[in-house]
Image (cartoon, grey):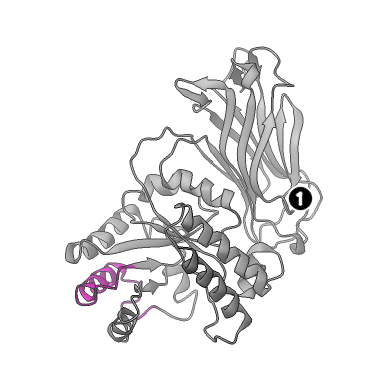
Amino acid sequence: ANLPAFADEAAKHNIEVWPYIVPWSETPPKKPLFSEPFKTNYIEWARQIAALSLQHPNIAGFVIDDFYGNTDEDHFTPEYVRRMVGAGKQINPKLKFYPLMYFQTPWDAFTARFGSLVDGVVICYPKSELGVRNAATYLNDQRHGPTAIITLPRHHGANRGDGVSIEASTSSVDRRGTQSVNITDPSNAELTFYYDATDQAESDTSLQIARVRVDDQVVWQSPTEGRMRDGVVDIDLRRIVRHPRRVKIGFDVFCDRTGVPDVLPIEVRFDDIRVYGAPHGDIPFANDLVMHGSLSGKFEAVLMPGSRQTGRFHIPLTLMPSGEGEQYEKRYDLPGTPDAVGLKVRLCLDLMRLGIAEGTVPYSTPLDPRDPMFDAVHRQFAAFRRSK
């Protein structure tokens, strides 16, 4: 009932309005409140928002919170989202739908299911420029290597030796029945991937080890709760592969001690895995890598293939950094000071300036101008406007 009046007031200041709707997972019986008045009838939400947008042109689109976690067979299936989006665009073809996502999303699976149905995405809590660029690779349908996402779900716990081992191969097996990668150009042999882990040091789950093996030799490893939780890993294979041959390449995450407590979920990503020196057609890295995994304990793994750039979609992204201290500490495992919050907002604004992101919307910034968090966020936006 208040949306039309709010939109009119926002229009006086040239502000776009995007209604923000909670999904099934945030409604009764799990959570106490619905988005009103249409509750979980998201098709009707799209229709009514579209109708209002004809009268209030600054209503540009709508966002649904925690979208990907609600994409099971009973909720946001591709068919349901197609009906929802279509209901809005039938009334106003310009109305946009942006699901709210997280950087832990399996992007290749998301784009395969919803790439043609969304107009953009809002992604929460960026860690670094590298992490944003990694997501943009998938959202812009650029060529990439395969992905391995390894998780220990919330409340599952683990024992020593539990984990996941993944082997890569450029064919199912070699002549000896071993999964391996055929390095034909050892002078350019190199392994790169984007690595990220959600484990937190304060949760006392520093019992997980992520590592990479080449011919059963450990060439890289990191505790999952270590500060190196977001970045591109580059491993020079030339010292290992001195002539053309097949090599075994493996990725592991395992528990290194008995009795990991039932705490927050742990997720480790080996993303956009590229083996150079094993070209595939006109692509300089092994774009045909096949990933095979074995699991023990309660660990889970999602394996997704690489892709050539096909131009099927271009999905703009808007970044949502934390605008207050509590969420900052929860997401980054670091003190949520005003300066820290402001620097993350500046990162997002810089990525807008570079054309990587189209927008920045801090989450839950206090609205009191006297609040130090408000001041920290305001200063970054003011500096951004001055620099344009």
Q: Is residue 178 visible?
A: no
Q: Amino acid at mark 1?
A: Asn
The C terminus lies in quadrant: bottom left
Numbered disc 1: secondary structure? loop
Q: Is residue 329 left or right of residue 95?
A: right
- Residue drawn at x 54%, y 55% as measured from the top left: 103
The N terminus lies in quadrant: bottom left
Q: Residues within 10 Å of mark 1 (few under 14, many from 20)?
A: some
Q: Nearer the viewer, residue 160 or 264?
A: 264
Q: Position of residue 273 (x, y in %)?
A: 57, 35
Q: How many marks?
A: 1
Q: Nearer the viewer, residue 216 or 257?
A: 216
Q: Position of residue 329 (x, y in %)?
A: 67, 69
Q: Is residue 233 visible?
A: yes
58 magenta-colored: yes
Q: Is residue 200 left or right of residue 302?
A: right
Quarter of the image where one finds residue 20:
bottom left
- Residue drawn at x 38%, y 67% as measured from the top left: 63
Q: Position of residue 29 (x, y in %)?
A: 47, 76
Placement of 266 over or under 190, stated as above or below: below
Q: Nearer the viewer, residue 252 or 138?
A: 138
87 magenta-colored: no
Q: Position of residue 170 (x, y in %)?
A: 54, 23
Q: Which contiguous range is marked in magenta?
A: 35-61
Placement of 234 over or under 301, stated as above or below: above
Placement of 30 over or under 271, stated as above or below: below
Which residue is denoted by mark 1 in the rendering?
159
